[in-house]
Structures are given as C-alpha cells and as structure tokens.
Image (cartoon, rainbow, N blue to C red):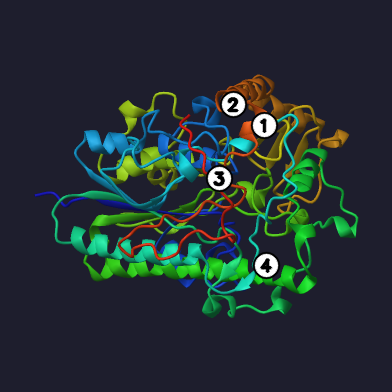
C-alpha cells in the first residue's frame, strides 16, 4: 500500500521575510522557521500577487492573478469562484480543511474546504467597501490608528486567536494521525499583523538599542514618490505615534510578534514530528504580503517596495533537498505545489494559471529572469500600481505617475530610483515592455475602478458606501464554546452593522 501524502500550508499575515534568522536578519529570533528552512528549501525571492490581504488571498486560493479574477481590493473577497486548489482536492477525494484566518467572504460559500475551523473572514461578508471609493479616495479623519490604539507589550484579540488556531491545529493533527486518509490542512495565523501588541515574553526579547536607523525617512530629507506620498497621507501611522518611545515600541512589538509567530509554527512542527507524520507530510510556510515596518516612514503594506511585496516562502518535507532557491516565485506557485504535494497532477488544472510547482523550481537550474507581477488597486491609491521583478531589475509602473526602476543587484534596499537615469534607459524600456506583455496597466486601472464604482452604487452610492466596512483590522471570530476567547475591541476593529453580499 503506497504511503499517504499530506500537506500542511501555514500562512501568516504581514510577515516581512527579512525578519527571520534564516534570511539573514542580525537579531530577530525565529528558531523554528530557521529549522524548517534548514531542513527544506527557502525561496529567497518570493512575492505576493498584491500587497493587501483580500486580493492576495484570492490569488492564493485560485492560482490566478488579481486582474484575472477581479478581486481588486478588500471589499471584493473570494466567494469560492473561480475554482481553487481546494476544489481540485475535493474532486480527487483528498481530505482538505482549514483552521484560522482565510479572509474570504463567508464560510457559507463553497471555498474548497470540507470544513473551516474558527475561520476569520471579512467583516459581515462585505469587507472595506469604503475603500472602493477611489479617484479620489476618501479621507477618514475620524478613523482609529491603523496600528491599533495600544502599542507595546501585552495580549490582543489577535494573539489570543493565534493561540486558539495553533491549539486547534495540534488537536486536528492528533486526530489525523489516527486516520489513514491523506490530508491537506491550511492553517491561517494572524501575527505579525497589527495591532502592534506582542506577548511580554516575546516583546522582551528585544531592546530599543537594537532598532536600526530609520530607512529613507522623510525627516532626513528623503522625498517619497508622489504615488507613495498619497498613500502615506492616507495611512498616516507615523504621525500618529504619541512619542518617540511609542514609535520604538512599535518596532519592538513587530519584532516580538515575529517571534510569537515563530513559536506558533514551532508548536505545529513539533506536533507533526511527535505524531509520526514527518515522513509523509510536506510543510509550506508563507505569508499573504509583507510590512513596511517604518521604512520610508510607512507601516502596513500597500506599496510596491520589497518590504511590502516580498513574502517568506519555505517548503520542507520528504524528498525535499535542503537549500536556497534563487528563482523568483510568488503565491500563485502554491496552486500546483499543493496539488503535487498531495500526489495530484496539476497539469490539467493549470489553464491560464501562471504558477509553477515549488518542488520543480527547487530542482531546476536557477531562473533569475522569471518575471513576477504584483498589482495594487486598493485603499489609499487613486490609480493602480504594478510591480514587475525580472532578473536584477524591479520596475514600478504607476498609472498617471512616473515609474520607478531599481537594480536589486547593486541596490537591494531600493534607495536609488534609476528610472530617469539615461544610463539605464534601455533597462527601463525593456521592463516596461515586459510588463505590457503580461497586462495593460491603464486598461486594468479603468476596469478595476469600474468594478469598484459598480459595487459602491449597488450598496446605495458614495454616502452609504463610505460608512460600510471596518476602519481597522478584521475582528477575530467569537464562538460560544470557548475556542475563541477574545471578542473584537477598539484595538482591532471599528465595524458597522451593515451586511452585504457582492
């Protein structure tokens, strides 16, 4: 009888991949992720299809680019269509379940899971409809701070939720170990997503003197790109810190949340090993997008810089030769990866899906010229932004604005925009042409705004839409059986009572 093949996908939220020991960070403590990477493959150039939650997660589910499915922003969540990798598994009779954050529309939708355990979805099934008002976008002067009203050491509903998700995953695996059926288990953790409140034992791992100097901070004379400046004026996290001490605590809390996340992953890894599942189970670790963590005076995601569009990507398990893969990858590659890990030929399902299996990419010669696209059509942007990574070059195309061009080989921190440098005019032309081979940015900007305007009109127009949706982070689910112990508070959500189905 052939050995069963299992897959566990662990997805965190807002984890900048630079904040791991295995990626070279000088002091961030992530021993469990480091151990996972040491026993598997770390993909050093991994990206999100969109640097914001809902579009990225819809792309992850379907293996399709954001502009292929029209999940443009956090008001247009995944509803179970188009077909995703979970549906393929269900058709093939593979047990597939989820635990934790998904950020789709509703567990009532056919999302491709046999069962969803304590799922976190968008608020009320509609998400941030107010953020679909664009060009011009609306300013929410009364909105609470994006990073949360409290910053520092402590417990938040999110840390309580992650503890519940981790414990539920361990209990689920204990049951699976007694069951001969193969499985694919998705585990959605929230850390290190804001609010920036880290459990004290993890917050206290770090000290203020470890915080590096501000990267490209406007206070030192750095001028943000106009498209990015518009987002900064919308987000305004930096100017809302009460003091320099609180700003320092924000860094320490992010560091602490990365270590808290690592601890959760380690508990799951330990359970896999202790239950005898290690020889039959592949583990994927990734995140939906990164976080700026103060670079350019920005927090959160929503930019095209490495801090925001990069994600961690680690694959480990039986038959995976340890190493580092330099070929650029993204979340779309998980569609064929998950299916291959479960023993299913992904070929008949690929169609217009651009992904490639991480198993195959790790074994193939490095392909630095593989193009990777990320796109943004959401909160704080009047026009669309597109990122193309190809070889040493990273190109940012902003509709109605001048582009940016970075040479990641000589400038990995993206400190010098070369777009206006005549020496690099040829590279700029080539990268622009490569982007247009994939999509038409201006046409997609028009299409996205038309879809968003239609949504706004369906709910009753701009005045009504401006009050629909969370102004902060999505609240944790609350159940009556004690699984999720923390209700939503003002630290995580300021929600409305509307209910909408897109």
Q: Which residue is at 36% across, 69% downward?
A: 267
Q: Which residue is at 32% across, 54% downward?
A: 282
Camera-nearest label, 2 or 4: 2
Residue in the foreground of this view, choosing between 392 and 490 = 490
Q: Which residue is mark 2?
A: 460
- Residue 493, quarter of picture: bottom right
Q: Which residue is mark 1?
A: 463
Question: From the viewer's perspective, is residue 478 above or below residue 401?
Answer: below
Residue in the foreground of this view, choosing between 478 and 238 = 478
Q: Which residue is mark 3?
A: 496
* Nearer-N-terminus badge (4/1): 4
Residue 343 is at least partly visible in this image: yes
Do tag 4 and tag 1 residues touch (Cβ < 8 Å)? no
Residue 202 pos. (x, y %):
54, 76
Question: From the viewer's perspective, is residue 28 above or below residue 63?
Answer: below
Q: Which residue is mark 4?
A: 250
Do tag 2 and tag 1 residues touch (Cβ < 8 Å)? yes
Residue 435 pos. (x, y %):
65, 27
Graded by Cα atoms within 10 Å as few (under 14), some (14 to 19) or many (20 or more), the crowding at tag 2 reads few
Q: Which residue is at 78% across, 29% downward?
A: 426
Do tag 2 and tag 4 residues touch (Cβ < 8 Å)? no
Residue in the foreground of this view, choosing between 277 and 104 = 104
Using the numbered discs, state the Cα–Cα distance from disc 1 to disc 3 in whole angstroms.
14 Å
Using the numbered discs, state the Cα–Cα distance from disc 2 to disc 3 in whole angstroms.
15 Å
Using the numbered discs, state the Cα–Cα distance from disc 4 to disc 3 in whole angstroms.
27 Å
Label 3 SS: loop
């Amino acid at each position: 009888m052939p050995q069963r093949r299992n897959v566990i996908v662990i997805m965190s939220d807002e984890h900048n991949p630079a904040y791991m020991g295995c990626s070279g960070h000088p002091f961030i403590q992530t021993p469990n992720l480091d151990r996972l990477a040491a026993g598997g493959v770390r993909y050093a150039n991994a990206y999100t299809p969109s640097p914001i939650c809902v579009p990225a997660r819809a792309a992850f589910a379907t293996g399709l680019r954001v502009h292929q499915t029209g999940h443009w922003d956090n008001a247009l969540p995944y509803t179970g269509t188009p077909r995703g990798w979970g549906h393929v598994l269900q058709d093939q009779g593979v047990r597939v379940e989820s635990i934790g954050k998904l950020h789709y529309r509703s567990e009532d939708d056919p999302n491709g899971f046999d069962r969803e355990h304590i799922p976190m979805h968008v608020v009320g099934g509609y998400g941030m409809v107010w953020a679909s008002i664009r060009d011009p976008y609306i300013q929410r002067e009364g909105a609470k701070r994006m990073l949360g009203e409290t910053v520092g050491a402590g417990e938040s509903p999110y840390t309580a939720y992650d503890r519940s998700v981790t414990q539920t995953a361990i209990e689920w695996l204990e049951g699976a170990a007694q069951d001969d059926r193969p499985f694919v288990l998705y585990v959605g953790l929230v850390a290190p997503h804001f609010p920036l409140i880290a459990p004290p034992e993890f917050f206290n791992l770090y000290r203020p003197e470890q915080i590096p100097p501000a990267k490209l901070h406007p206070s030192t004379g750095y001028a943000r790109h106009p498209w990015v400046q518009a987002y900064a004026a919308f987000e305004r996290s930096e100017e809302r810190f009460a003091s320099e001490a609180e700003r320092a605590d924000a860094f320490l809390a992010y560091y602490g949340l990365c270590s808290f996340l690592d601890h959760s992953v380690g508990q799951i890894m330990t359970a896999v090993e202790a239950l005898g599942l290690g020889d039959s189970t592949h583990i994927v670790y990734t995140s939906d997008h990164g976080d700026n963590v103060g670079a350019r005076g920005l927090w959160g995601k929503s930019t095209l810089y490495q801090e925001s569009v990069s994600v961690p990507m680690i694959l480990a398990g039986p038959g995976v030769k340890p190493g580092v893969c330099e070929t650029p990858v993204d979340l779309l590659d998980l569609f064929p990866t998950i299916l291959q890990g479960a023993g299913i030929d992904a070929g008949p399902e690929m169609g217009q899906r651009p992904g490639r299996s991480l198993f195959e990419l790790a074994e193939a010669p490095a392909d630095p010229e593989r193009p990777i696209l990320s796109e943004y059509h959401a909160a704080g942007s009047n026009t669309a932004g597109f990122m193309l990574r190809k070889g040493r070059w990273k190109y940012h195309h902003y509709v109605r604005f001048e582009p940016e061009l970075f040479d990641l080989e000589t400038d990995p921190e993206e400190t010098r925009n070369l777009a206006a440098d005549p020496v690099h005019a040829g590279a700029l032309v080539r990268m622009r042409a490569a982007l247009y081979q994939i999509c038409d940015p201006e046409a997609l900007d028009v299409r996205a705004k038309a879809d968003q305007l239609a949504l706004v009109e369906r709910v009753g127009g701009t005045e009504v839409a401006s009050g629909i949706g969370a102004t902060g982070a999505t609240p944790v689910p609350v159940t009556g059986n004690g699984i999720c112990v923390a209700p939503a508070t003002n630290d995580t959500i300021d929600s409305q009572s509307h209910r909408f189905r897109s």
